Image (cartoon, rainbow, N blue to C red):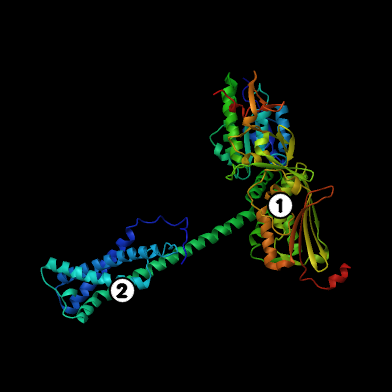
Amino acid sequence: MTTVSTPEHAPPAPPFYVAPLKRGLRSLGAGLVFGIALTVIRHQDLGITLIYTCLITLICWFCIDFGRTGVARLVHKHSAAAPTAAERDWPGWPWMVVVIIVGSGVGFSVGTAAGDWITGSRSSNLYNQGSLPDALSLLLFALIPAIALTYFFYSRSVIAHQETNVQAARGQAAESRLKLLESQLEPHMLFNTLANLRVLITVDPKRAEAMLDQLIAYLRATLSASRTAHHALRAEFARLADYLALIQVRMADRLELRFELPEDLESVEIPALLLQPLVENGIKHGLEPAVRGGRLTIGAARDGDQLVLWVRDTGVGLRDAPLGVETGTGLSAAAGVPAATPSAEASGGGFGLQQVRERLATQYGAQASLRLEPVPDADGGTLATIRLPLMGIAPATDAKKS
Amino acid sequence: MNSGIARALIAEDEPLLADGLAAQLAALWPELVVVAKVRDGLTAVTQALALRPDIVFLDIQMPGQNGIDAAEAIGEDWADDASLPLMVFVTAYDRYAVQAFEQSAIDYVLKPVQAERLAKTCARLRAALEARATRTGASAEQLEYLTQLRRLIETNGPGRTSQAPLRTIQASIGATIHMVPIDAVLYFEAEDKYIRVVTAAREYLIRQSLRQLLAQLDPQRFWQVHRGTIVCVDAIATALRDDSGKVFLQLRGRPETLTVSRLYAHLFKPM
């Protein structure tokens, strides 16, 4: 069993004495039941029997419960490995058997003696038995309920601990899903789009309606992308066009768009929204920071048995990215990306690129690659290129292409 | 006192949003005149300095220079004889720590801009402008405003790195990397996308932002005295305050004089 940090939504832990007190009361309850049972079976006086059974179970519980904690601490003090929270108060079953035997022996003797003192009578006790077998059979009387109760408490704590584990795991899964969703939805983009929509509603309701439709299409695609693993390049380009139409409203004349999708590649299947992070990066780090804006081109081509997809912007570029604007994305230079200045890397949208790389790696292994490089021509900017094995295309189109 | 008439500049890179804000302002505050709408942070500074509006609405995410840097530049280069414009930051997502200024003179609104929130801002701006018009000696208020602006800039800059301060500057000249010990540096000066590293003997260029560099320097030894200048305290021989309150630094080992901007003038006071 491993340690888990308490999930944030868990209620605060009760004071330390609550759990032992509960166990003590449950033991007392068992003592009462035991006493009543004895009275019924042996037709004894109920009051006197209860005094004995309750005293014996309480003292047995006290010795075993605190003996367990004490022995556990001792055992773990001398073991090399640091005990987990669950192990700390549990010495293991072999030690526990010793604790139970000693604890119920002491509990039975002291409990009986105390009962004698209260009632003024003299009962048979462990130390005044004639023979060892007699003493042992008397001890069994206390031992069996003690073992049963210990096992009961032990199972309960194991179940409780497992529940905590499950809850923590659930919490972590939900948190990581939320993080992914937040990164996909991009709050900055969303609120800016809504701000534009708010203005358009009064100024140009027709355009507002069109923009709203594009936002809906974008949201639907984003939210369902994780469920549909693949779609055709035609669909990929359509989704990107929806997204870019939203950006176009915001950037107006600062953004020029170009799509280059050859007809014969339209139905080639690729992982859904694979290009989205690259397009977002081109906008966010290339064109949005450029005072005059620029052009974004998304293209697809075939190179032998490979499919080449690219996103190119004519924005501020890797080398000329404004420094100190975005920090803390923590992108490490991964294979396939030429070393850029640390600041350009930091502004290169670490999370998005990493996502693309991970998807490529899990789908195609070493057969796919992602490159990010500055473009040396007059327009400058950045080029992101994905290469992956061409699949799901009829050989007939090969002839058409040549 | 000319009541109600105020002039505003809107710096917002998205034209629709600039128009929308202007329309909302026109409805809430008819006497407010929008003197210009600009679409990037650099033009925001030049236009603000040229047109001298009473109020500047600054989008935080703008091309060229972000709204906070633009505010810093406006604060530093504003004419000494005039009151600083009241600044309002506009942002789509409160990743920036502007909300820390809820109670300060520097206001912010979130996009999409909601009418009620903007009405509150307008009321605040009106009150501040009226208070200014009736007040005679405005220098204390100006100083307070500058302090708040400086704190806002600090909050939104990269925090000091927890690592040990930088000890060597690595500057390349051609294919050679020059290792410049930090003790030899007298001051750093931002120049376009570069920083000039000045020692007694010579100068080097490094490609970094002044903000990022500042985060790596020992704050005891290096002080920012201007948005474009970080100086080694030990290299300062004298600080001279002129009649207008401007401070100039004379250095040991260099002939030039450095100017301290009004945002940092408070650093130089007799003990």
Instruction: Locate residue A245, reporting x and y percent.
Output: 73, 52
Image location of residue A252, percent across then percent down: 75, 45
Can residue A54 be seen by looking at this rendering? Answer: yes
Q: Quadrant of residue A105?
A: bottom left
Mark 1 / mark 2, whichever is N-terminal: 2
**Which of the pair B200/A103 is nearer the observer?**
B200
Quadrant where the C terminus of chain B sits is top right
Mark 1 residue type = Asn
The amino acid beneath tag 2 is: Ile
* Residue A147 - label: 2
Q: Real-space Cα distance between discs 1 and 2?
A: 65 Å
Which residue is label 1 attached to? A281
Based on the displayed image, in which of its 4 quarters is residue A179 positioned?
Answer: bottom right
In the displayed structure image, the side of residue A265 where residue B23 appears, left or right: left
Q: Pointer 2 indicates a residue of which chain?
A: A
Farthest left residue in view: A120
Other residues around mark 1 within 10 Å, as few (<14) / some (14–19) / many (≥20): many
Pick the residue in front: A330 or A283. A330
Residue B58 visible somewhere in the drawing: no
Report x, y in % for residue A27: 27, 67
Identify whether A350 is placed above or below B81.
Answer: below
Relative image position of residue A381 (x, y in whole percent): 78, 49
Q: Residue furthest right?
A: A402
Q: Secondary structure at mark 2?
A: helix
**Which residue occupies 60% across, 34% down?**
B221
